[in-house]
Image (cartoon, helix red, strand yellow):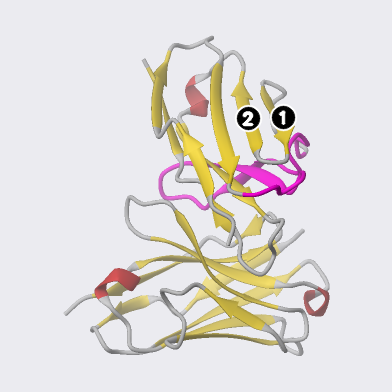
């Protein structure tokens, strides 16, 4: 099974800051990585698919990069509505999806 | 528009059984693999089970293997999760997932 290691587990930043979350896979997953945003009481919402693709409606201040085993989610110009928990997910192994442990983003 | 609507959650005693359903619409159901993912209160996302498009092949997380069964009825565009021998640690919101699309979740609480 592919293990996903996400860091940090939480962070606090100011409005307007740039925030970076990293995710490392235990083996090469090529570009089969998604990022999700989850707010309390809601299901996860896809933020970025296939490492760097933003679905329609996702603000351009969100950006994804990486390949192989190392991936990054960057939030530019952090906004109050970005307070949420963020998860990476690999789907290289479709027999068993796996997720990072999550990063809780708060406003300082 | 892809829609996934789970039902069947509730409060159940340890050792009991429960069956979750997920009604799918907005896509050709019998062409897609489907997954169940769960989230315990205050915890992260954990993959539970997966089924191929025709319902012939399934895989499970070790924590549920032998107790849970994923199945589907392609004629009714519905995904199921039969949960037996439930334990306290199975308490979670269970999500039906297709690709990047998630249902709203069904809460299962295992408690005496």
Q: Mark 1 vs mark 2: same chain?
A: yes
> Which image quarter holds the N terminus of chain B?
bottom right
Question: Where is residue B7 shown, x and y percent of the image?
Answer: 50, 76
* Majority secondary structure in the magenta region: loop
Question: Where is residue B26 shown, x and y percent of the image?
Answer: 78, 66
Residue A2 appears in which quarter of the rendering?
A: bottom right
Q: Disc 1 and disc 2: Cα gap in Å?
A: 5 Å
Q: Chain of mark 2?
A: A
Q: Secondary structure at mark 2?
A: strand
Instruction: Tell me the number on the disc at residue B65.
Output: none
Identify whether B67 is placed above or below B52: below
Magenta residues? A27-55
Question: Where is residue A86 shown, x and y percent of the image?
Answer: 51, 38
What residue sits right under mark 1 in the picture?
Answer: A65
Q: Is residue A58 left or right of residue B43?
A: right
Q: Is residue A101 left or right of residue B99?
A: left
Tag 1 near tag 2, CB within 8 Å? yes
Q: Residues within 10 Å of mark 1 (few under 14, many from 20)?
A: some
> Which image quarter holds the C terminus of chain B?
bottom left
The answer to if A51 sits in the magenta stretch is yes
Number of residue marks: 2
Residue lying at the far left in this picture: please name it. B112
Along the polypeptide, which appears first: circle 1 or circle 2? 1
Residue B18 appears in which quarter of the rendering?
A: bottom left
What residue sits right under mark 2 in the picture?
Answer: A72
Give me the residue at 64% from left, 35% from top.
A70
Q: Residues within 10 Å of mark 2 (few under 14, many from 20)?
A: many
Q: Chain of mark 1?
A: A
Front residue of B54 and A68: A68
Q: Secondary structure at mark 1?
A: strand
């Amino acid at each position: 099974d592919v293990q996903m290691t996400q860091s940090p587990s939480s962070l606090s930043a100011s409005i307007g800051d740039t925030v970076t979350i990293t995710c490392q896979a235990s083996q090469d997953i090529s570009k089969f990585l998604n990022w999700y945003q989850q707010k309390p009481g809601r299901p996860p919402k896809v933020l970025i698919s296939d490492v760097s693709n933003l679905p329609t409606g996702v603000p351009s201040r969100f950006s994804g990069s990486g390949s192989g085993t190392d991936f990054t989610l960057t939030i530019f110009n952090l906004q109050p509505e970005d307070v949420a928990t963020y998860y990476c997910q690999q789907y290289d192994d479709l027999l068993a999806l796996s997720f990072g442990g999550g990063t809780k983003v708060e406003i300082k | 528009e892809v829609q996934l609507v789970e039902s069947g959650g509730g409060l159940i005693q340890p050792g009991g059984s429960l069956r979750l359903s997920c009604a799918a619409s907005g896509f050709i159901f019998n062409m897609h693999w489907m997954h169940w993912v769960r989230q315990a209160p205050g915890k992260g996302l954990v993959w539970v089970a997966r089924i191929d498009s025709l319902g012939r092949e399934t895989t499970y997380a070790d924590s549920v293997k032998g107790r849970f069964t994923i199945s589907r009825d392609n004629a009714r565009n519905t995904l199921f999760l039969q949960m037996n021998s439930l334990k306290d640690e199975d308490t979670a919101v269970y999500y039906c997932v297709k690709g990047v699309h998630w249902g709203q979740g069904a809460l299962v609480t295992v408690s005496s």
